[in-house]
Image (tube, rainbow, N blue to C red):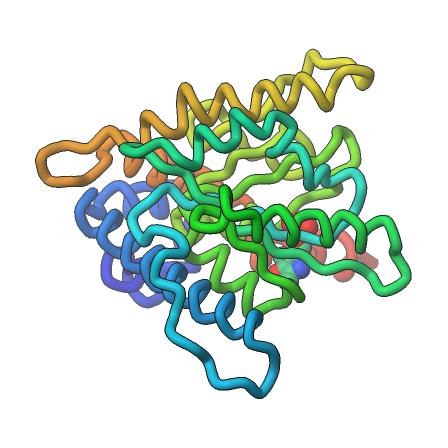
Amino acid sequence: MFETHLGEDWARRNASEWAAGIESISDEALWRSHSLLRQKLIAFLRERVSRNQNGEGDAVKEPETQRLNPDALTIGFARRVAEYKRWALPVTDPARFLQLLHDADRPVQFVFSGKAHPQDQGAKIILQRVAKWAADPLLRDRVVFLEDYDQEIARQLVQSVDVWLNVPRRPFEASGTSGEKVAINGGLNFSVLDGWWLEGYDGTNGFAIGDLSEGETNADAADAESFYSVLEKQIVPLYYDRDADGIPHRWVAMMRRSIATLVPQFNSDRMVAEYAERIYLQE
Ligand SMILES: *Cc1c(COP(=O)(O)O)cnc(C)c1O
C-alpha cells in the first residue's frame, strides 16, 4: 500500500512527505487492507492452536472455527516473560476482563504469546498460568495463547493486530521495540508510558496506560484500573463506532496519525544511520 500511494522508494521519504503521503490514503483503502490482515491472522491462529493441541506429527484436525472472531477488536500481547512485564495485569479483575470479552455487540479478544528462558523457573510458572487460563471454557473463544514466541509468530502478530498492549512496570522498559513494529503496520499502541512509548505517544496517536504522576508503591493497582478504564471508555467505543459504510472513521484517523508521526522516528534505518554518524564514523 505504501508503494502504491507513496512510490517504490517510500522508505526514503522525509517526515513531512511521509505524513502527506499517509494523509492521501483513503479510509476505505487503509481499513480494508488492515481488516484483511486481521482476518488472515485469525486463520493462522486457529491453525496453530489446533496443531498445538494435536501434538507434533498428528494430522491437523478441523480448524477451530469458533475460536476468535475475524472482525472483533483484537489485542496482541507477546514478549519475553520477565517479571517487570506484568503478564497478569490484564486479569487483575477477572469479572471485568470477562465482561470485555463477552460483550455481545462489542467483543474484545486477546492473543498472548511468550517464551520463558529454560533456567527461569518464575517465568515458566507465569506461562503455565497463562496457558491454563487461556484454556478455561469461559475464555476459550476469546483468548488464545501461543507457545514458543518466535519471529514467525511475532511477524504475524505485529502485522495484523488492532491494538498492541504493553504493561511494563515503570521505569524498567528499555524500549519495547515490538510496538514500533506494530506502528508501521497500522496497529495502535496501548501502553504504559515507559521505554519508547514515553517518547512516541503524543495524545493523538495511540493510547496510554496510567500517567507519569503515579508513585512506585501503588503502580500495579493504578495501572490495572487505567488499563480497564481506557479500554472500556476509549478503545472499545472508538473501534465499534461505525458509519453506514462499516468503517470506523475515527479509528482509521488514529491509525493514520500513528503511522504518520511514529514511523519516521522509530525505525531501524534511522537508528543505524544515527549510530553511524554519531559514533562509528567519529574520528
Ligand atoms: C521484537 C521482538 C522482541 C523484542 O520485543 P520488545 O517489545 O522490545 O520486548 C522479542 N522477540 C521477538 C520474536 C521479536 O520479534
- In the rendered view, tell whether residue 237 sits above or below residue 27: above
Where the N terminus falls, by quadrant? bottom left
The reply to whether residue 15 is in sight is no
Q: Give the percent coordinates (x, y) of residue 134.
A: 57, 50
Asked whether, in this view, residue 266 is left or right of residue 101, the answer is: right
Asked whether, in this view, residue 156 is left or right of residue 24, the answer is: right
Residue drawn at x 39%, y 59% as measured from the top left: 42
The reply to whether residue 61 is in sight is yes
Residue drawn at x 48%, y 22% as measured from the top left: 230
Q: Quadrant of residue 268?
A: bottom right
Residue drawn at x 33%, y 40% as measured from the top left: 256
The quarter of the rendering in which ligand 1 is drawn is bottom right
Q: Give the percent coordinates (x, y) of residue 192.
A: 63, 30
Total residue callouts: 0
The front one of 231 and 200 is 231
- In the rendered view, tell whether residue 137 sits above or below residue 84: below
Where the C terminus falls, by quadrant? bottom right
Residue drawn at x 28%, y 53% as measured from the top left: 35
The front one of 269 and 101 is 101
Residue furthest front in the image: 137
The front one of 192 and 92 is 92
Q: Give the percent coordinates (x, y) of residue 41.
A: 40, 61
Q: Quadrant of residue 215?
A: top right
Residue furthest left in the image: 244
Asked whether, in this view, residue 231 is left or right of residue 255, the answer is: right
Q: Give the percent coordinates (x, y) of residue 118.
A: 85, 65
Asked whether, in this view, residue 239 is left or right of residue 181, the answer is: left
